[in-house]
């Protein structure tokens, strides 16, 4: 029967790992709220302007339009991918 003892340094190390992991998760969450221009979205999806127009027109990809510039949330791209997962 092995007994492992935790030292104060072990606990401090664990605490720092947990804090770093939480910070990492928060940064990912903040990135999801980033608004992208259509040129960036086309690069991410590897699609044409026409395909992007069809995705928006069909309601599959929500967007905002400000003074002629169309913006799409990164989180909405993630939702698009998630909704088309083939099991």
Image (cartoon, rainbow, N blue to C red):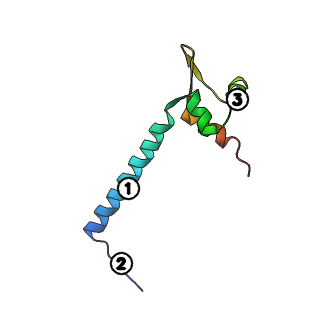
**How busy is the neighbourhood of tag 2: few (under 14 within 10 Å), some, or many (20 plus)?**
few
* Residue at the left extreme, as displayed: 8
Residue 78, placed above or below residue 49: below
Circle 2 sits on which residue?
4
Picture coordinates of residue 47 (x, y %)? 67, 35
Residue 29, given in percent of the width and then of the height, sits at: 47, 40
Residue placed at 31% from the left, 72% from the top? 6
Tag 3 and tag 2, C-beta contact below 8 Å: no
Numbered disc 3: secondary structure: helix
Q: Is residue 42 left or right of residue 84?
A: left
Report helix, strand or loop for mark 2: loop
Residue identifier under label 3: 55
As rendered, which of 18 and 4 lies closer to the eye?
Answer: 18
Q: Residues within 10 Å of mark 1 (few under 14, many from 20)?
A: few
Residue 84 place in picture, x, y as percent: 71, 42
Q: Which residue is mark 1?
A: 18
Closer to the chain start, of discs 1 and 3, is 1
- Of residues 26 and 5, the one nearer the viewer is 26
Secondary structure state at the residue bearing disc 1: helix
The answer to whether marks 1 and 3 mark residues whose Cβ atoms lie closer than 8 Å is: no
Q: Residue at x 68, y 40 (%)?
A: 83
Residue 80, position in %: x, y?
65, 37
Q: Residue at x 71, y 23 (%)?
A: 57
Residue drawn at (67%, 27%) of the image: 49
């Amino acid at each position: 029967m092995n007994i492992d003892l935790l030292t104060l340094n072990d606990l401090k190390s664990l605490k720092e790992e947990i804090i770093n992991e939480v910070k990492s998760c928060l940064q990912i969450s903040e990135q999801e709220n980033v608004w992208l221009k259509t040129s960036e979205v086309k690069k991410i999806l590897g699609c044409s302007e026409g395909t992007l127009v069809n995705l928006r027109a069909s309601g599959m990809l929500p967007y905002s339009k400000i003074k002629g510039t169309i913006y799409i949330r990164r989180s909405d791209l993630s939702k698009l991918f998630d909704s088309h997962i083939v099991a």
